[in-house]
């Protein structure tokens, strides 16, 4: 994620940031559910809820925003709009928060 950001590919760095949170939430899901196979979904809010995480409104809003970084290739117009707003500053702000949330969600997994 950080290397992609440093290469100036801010939209891709945010996409990978979404994956970072998705994977740590799936790890929490496995920890907090009897089944050890997490659902094949990308919705961060649903994963957080099913992982039994207690989130405040700010945390919920952030996950909903980061959900938008998981863009499928078939939505060309949406991808172009997203690419345009992915300035260095925009990406840096979100990547900093993604790292913070990752560390919060990681607690208790070690």
Image: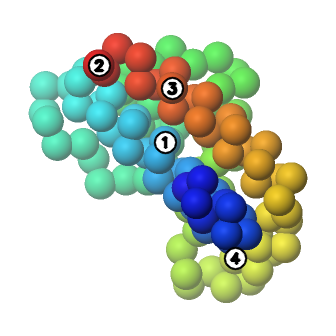
Q: Which residue is mark 4?
A: 79
Q: Which residue is mark 2?
A: 110
Q: CA distance from mark 2 to mark 3?
A: 11 Å
Q: Kindly identify the residue that appears in the image at 14 percent across and 36 percent down.
A: 36
Q: CA distance from mark 1 to mark 4?
A: 20 Å
Return the disc, 2 or 3, that comes first in the chain's sequence: 3
Q: Looking at the rendering, in which quadrant would you find the C terminus?
A: top left
Q: Kindly identify the residue that appears in the image at 50 percent across and 15 percent down.
A: 54
Badge 4: residue crowd in 10 Å (few <14, some 14–19, many ≥20): some
Q: Which residue is mark 3?
A: 103
Q: Looking at the rendering, in which quadrant would you find the N terminus?
A: bottom right
Badge 3: residue crowd in 10 Å (few <14, some 14–19, many ≥20): few
Judge from the rendering whether residue 36 lies leftward or rightward of residue 63; answer left or right: left
- From the viewer's perspective, is residue 64 above or below residue 32? below
Q: Nearer the viewer, residue 101 or 58?
A: 101
Q: Say whether marks 1 and 4 touch (CB < 8 Å).
A: no
Q: Kindly identify the residue that appears in the image at 76 percent across and 80 percent down.
A: 80
- From the viewer's perspective, is residue 46 above or below residue 7? above
Q: CA distance from mark 1 to mark 2?
A: 16 Å
Q: Which residue is mark 1?
A: 21
């Amino acid at each position: 994620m950080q290397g992609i950001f440093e290469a100036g590919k801010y939209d891709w760095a945010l996409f990978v940031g979404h994956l970072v949170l998705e994977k740590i939430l799936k790890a929490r899901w496995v920890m907090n559910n009897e089944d050890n196979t997490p659902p094949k979904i990308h919705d961060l809010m649903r994963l957080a809820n099913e992982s039994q995480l207690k989130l405040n409104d700010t945390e919920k809003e952030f996950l909903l925003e980061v959900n938008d970084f998981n863009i499928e290739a078939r939505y060309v117009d949406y991808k172009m709009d997203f690419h345009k707003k992915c300035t260095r500053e925009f990406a840096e702000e979100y990547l900093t928060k993604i790292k913070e949330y990752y560390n919060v969600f990681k607690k208790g997994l070690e």
